[in-house]
Amino acid sequence: MSMWGFFDWLAGIKVYANCRFDKRFPGGYDCYLNYPHFHYDPDVEMPQEEGTTVITDESLRPLESRRAGKQIIMEKGYWAREATKAGQDWHWDAFDHTEIEKRVRHSWHYQVKTTRIPHDPDEPLVAIRVEVRNRYSAKWRKAYFPNPSWNLPVNFFFPIYNDKATLRRRQLEEKVD
């Protein structure tokens, strides 16, 4: 998601990201993108500006299907259906897409699967296998990032994404009896 947002930013397209608000960080946000972008809070409202790119990282919480009857989740489903018509490019991720609200999870244009090479996270990253399919084809297309013909090491691309962003800790609600 960060890479596609980066390419859009290079093309002059405004990028929105749901970075976590935290006044301890410069600018007041714990950003996962290292290129210029604008912030939004998916728990409040999705960006309405036409011709933009919207990235929703860790989208399970704001798009969870178990909360689908809540008005804010319904609004996101309506927004998702209209985003393409407004020229918005929306990227969201989830560990398990079946946990995402059905109006969103069934309205995808492309699905992207990534696999780390090597699988062991303690070993240095060599490449990422990327599998992509569009909504009109069941066939997955496979490639590697970076493409070996680019002759660039994978760490060349690290500066676009902050892999050291702090963990988003779930706030536990205390029950009052």
Image (tube, rainbow, N blue to C red):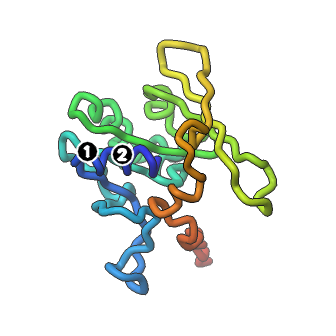
Q: Quadrant of residue 83?
A: top left
Q: Position of residue 132 (x, y in %)?
A: 56, 28
Q: Is residue 145 left or right of residue 70?
A: right
Q: Which residue corresponds to mark 1?
A: 11
Q: Quadrant of the C terminus?
A: bottom right
Q: Position of residue 136 (x, y in %)?
A: 48, 13
Q: Nearer the viewer, residue 72 or 80?
A: 80
Q: Which residue corresponds to mark 2?
A: 7
Amino acid marked by disc 2: Phe
Q: Is residue 98 visible?
A: no
Amino acid marked by disc 1: Ala
Separation (CA) of disc 2 from disc 1: 6 Å
Q: Quick one: label 2, few (<14), some, or many (20+) residues within 10 Å?
A: few
The residue lying furthest to the left in this view is 50
Q: Residue visible at 53% across and 54% down?
A: 58
Q: Nearer the viewer, residue 105 or 114?
A: 114
